[in-house]
Image (cartoon, rainbow, N blue to C red):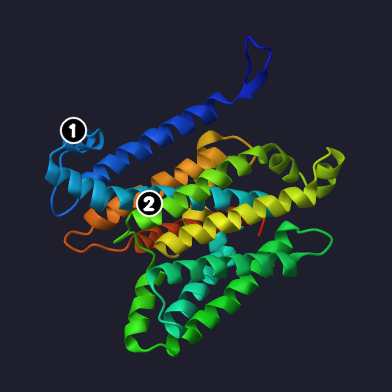
Amino acid sequence: MKAIRTRGGLSFRLDVRTAVVVAVLIVAALVASVVLIGTGDFYIPTADVVRTLLGNGDAGQEFIINDLRLPRVLVGLLVGAALGLGGAIFQSISRNPLGSPDILGLGQGSTAGALIMIVLFQGSAVQVAGGALVGGLVTGFAIYVLAWKRGVHGFRFVLVGIGVSAFVTAVNGYLLTKADIVDAARAVVWMTGSLNGRDWEQVWPLLVLCAILVPLVMTYARPLRMLEMGDDVGYALGVPVERTRIVLMGSAVLLTAAATAAAGPVSFVALTAPQLARRLTRSPGPNLLPAMFMGATLLIVADWASQRAFGADQLPVGVVTGVLGGIYLLWLLVIERKAGRI
């Protein structure tokens, strides 16, 4: 930690290691994005990708990059960042590394909203995305209300989330049994989590939401760090505990639900990104910025792997994150058990 004082008399502390980790993650995300843009049936060299992004490419490359591939990559970056930031908030509030949207059932809630629009109303893509957003918000509100008892405490919060997740998963299964074959196939594809076919219509709403919520969350980074020490300590330090918790949880639910609406329930990014970021920075606290950029990097790398690592078979990105995240979850459970925390 390094103290920095400006000429105007302002001073702040800079964690040099965290700043380096954030810078490296930003560079990694940008490099992976450029490589991914050049990847596909029509390969484009990296130099041509960069030249086209700067406005100096030919007409064919501009169409492929700007109209077809760039929106997909931007959706991937925004979805990964939203999931990483949302996961960091939930894990910090619950004071539990398992307190992520994947475990708490927010993804399943968004899936339920999307399935209702697909199965019951044969909704359009926009309506399905809206249903997913509403489903995530309703699920987040239900978890908060059910977990409330003179405050929201981590262990009860996680247990209630697991129970809600199980219930909503059962509802999703019931909806699938009531769907005809066409709607069921469409629903299963959406439930896998994919960036295929994403365009500018998915980019702009997610970009606007992130532009509003990310600065809001960052203004609450210091109170969130204090809440990790418990509500009593937060009250003693003058933190408006409930207001802080409601604003942050509401922001995390919106980020997670919007990411799910844009790309489907991409699993385990919200679980793994905050933990990997914390291990890299070796810094206590929520590590909001590192988690956000770690999520963006993870999803872009996973999307590249889904297209290139399995030969001619291209998998949805949710399959890749599910496999890697499942392995990570098992490892995390073993570590927590050895530490005596579960």
Task: Inspect the image, locate mark 2, and give the three-letter code of the amino acid beneath it.
Answer: Gly
Q: Which of marks 2 and 1 is in front?
A: 1
The x and y percentages for residue 130 are 49, 67
Quadrant assignment for the N terminus: top right
Quadrant assignment for the C terminus: bottom right
* Residue that badge 2 annotates: 76
The x and y percentages for residue 293 are 46, 41
- Report the number of numbered marks: 2
- The label shown at residue 56 is 1
The answer to whether residue 144 is above or below residue 305 is below
- Looking at the image, the residue that sits furthest to the right is 236
The x and y percentages for residue 95 are 68, 51
Q: Residues within 10 Å of mark 1 (few under 14, many from 20)?
A: few
The answer to whether residue 246 is above or below residue 228 is below
Helix, strand or loop at mark 2: helix
Task: Tell which circle, 2 or 1, labels the residue nearer the N-terminal end.
Answer: 1
Q: State the residue at coordinates (73%, 48%).
A: 244
Q: State the residue at coordinates (87%, 40%).
A: 236
Quarter of the image where one finds residue 198 = bottom left
> Is residue 91 visible to us here?
yes
Q: State the residue at coordinates (56%, 45%).
A: 212
